[in-house]
Amino acid sequence: MKRAIIAIATLMASAAMAQPVQPPPPRSYPVERALAAAPFITLRNERITMTVTPPDLKRGFFRGTRFDQAGVVTSLKLNGKEFYGPWFSRTAPEVLDYTYTEDGLVAGPDSAATGPVEEFAAIGFDDAKPGGTFHKIGVGVLRRPDDKAYDKYWHYEIADWGKRTTRHTRSSITFTQRIADPASGYGYGYGYDYEKTLRLVPGTTQLVIEHVLKNTGTRPISSNVYDHNFLRLTPGNDGIKVTFPFQLAAATPPAADMIRIEGNTMTYLRPMAYKERISFIVTGFGASALDYDISISDRIGAGVRMVGDQPMTRINIFSIDTTQSVEPYIAIELAPGAEKRWTYTYTFTAPQ
């Protein structure tokens, strides 16, 4: 068993889980191979071209159990500028999160996602005994293999993928997932209908991501969701500036020669080195959704403004030399029969 041969060191950086320590995989595969084999849908408006890979357990680009499988964006281009795309060069099934080998940066199946991809907190994991099941919205009903704590990097067996649909137009795509039979024994009374739409707004440089989640089970749903936002503006992130609408604070900020935090901004002062990593929590936001308004830009004026319509509960900053991520969390509390809607609006900028 993989768990028996891989030692996981759970290091903490300002309450953020660090990369597991692990041996290199015996072999890995170029990411281009996974992209070429996966189905995809191209969306366009007058300004943006975007590639989305739909859920597919046999051929899908992302088939992991960490992130929402619906609507993984593998490319978004404006004026020839690429904002997303793989931040890893290879993949391997044995890898937890990611690791480095002589062939390059290798991502495991549960972290090998791209773009503004979301992760929901597990539901019902502590209720499940070994062999029992729990939920991850956007993934499905998963099986708990043993009595170990939940590990987001671990690839869990999918016991029930749910009933899914995909429909799209020239500029939008909508995914649905239904786990609506709590009486089946899966999930101990949990059930839900989940809908997610990615829409390029006509005549603009905006991507809107809309969600509807309804609790169809007999137990309350208590969870959270964050967007990892695997952004790829410039190699090494040199000169990247992140601006918030509030005064920033960080309990354990990165080295002063790498990032300067001043007022409501943080700026990358130098390129990140190969294998260099940062992950830390920033604070200073309040209880208003108005604080969910984050702008990220590079030295030449390319960037994205991310606006959410929900209050944030946590913000993590993650970066390696191939990607920069601002990860805002929101809470999900749903009584049986209740419904929650939330939206993110991304406005992209790129010089012609």
Image (cartoon, grey):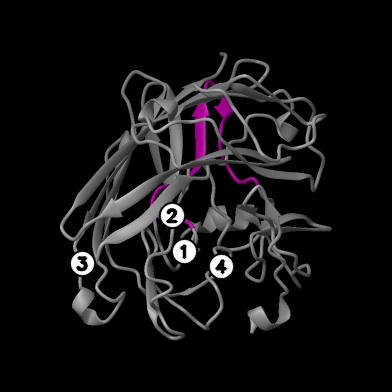
Does the CB distance between marks 2 and 3 fall below 8 Å? no
The amino acid on which the numbered mark 1 sits, given as a three-letter code, is Arg
- Reading the chain from its start, which is encountered first: label 4 or label 2? 2
Range of the magenta residues? 67-87
Residue with the mark numbered 2:
39
Q: Position of residue 209 (x, y in %)?
A: 35, 38
- Reading the chain from its start, which is encountered first: label 2 or label 3? 2
Left or right: 256 as drawn, with respect to 264: right
Using a 10 Å C-alpha cutoff, classify the residue at mark 4 as few (fewer than 14 neighbours), some (14 to 19) or many (20 or more).
few
Whole-number angstrom distance, CA of label 2 to CA of label 3: 32 Å
Q: Position of residue 185 (x, y in %)?
A: 26, 82
The answer to whether residue 141 is seen in the rendering is no
Q: Secondary structure at mark 2?
A: loop
- Reading the chain from its start, which is encountered first: label 3 or label 1? 1
Does the CB distance between marks 1 and 2 fall below 8 Å? yes
Whole-number angstrom distance, CA of label 1 to CA of label 4: 25 Å
Residue with the mark numbered 1:
59
Q: Nearer the viewer, mark 4 or mark 2?
A: 4
Whole-number angstrom distance, CA of label 1 to CA of label 2: 7 Å
Using a 10 Å C-alpha cutoff, classify the residue at mark 3 as few (fewer than 14 neighbours), some (14 to 19) or many (20 or more).
many
Q: Residue at x 37, y 19 (%)?
A: 204
Residue with the mark numbered 4:
151
- Reading the chain from its start, which is encountered first: label 3 or label 4? 4
Q: Is residue 287 above or below residue 136?
A: above
Q: Position of residue 272 (x, y in %)?
A: 78, 36
Give the quadrant of the C terminus. top right
In the drawing, what numbered circle is on residue 217?
3
Q: Is residue 31 above or below residue 141?
A: above
The answer to whether residue 18 is seen in the rendering is yes
The amino acid on which the numbered mark 3 sits, given as a three-letter code, is Gly
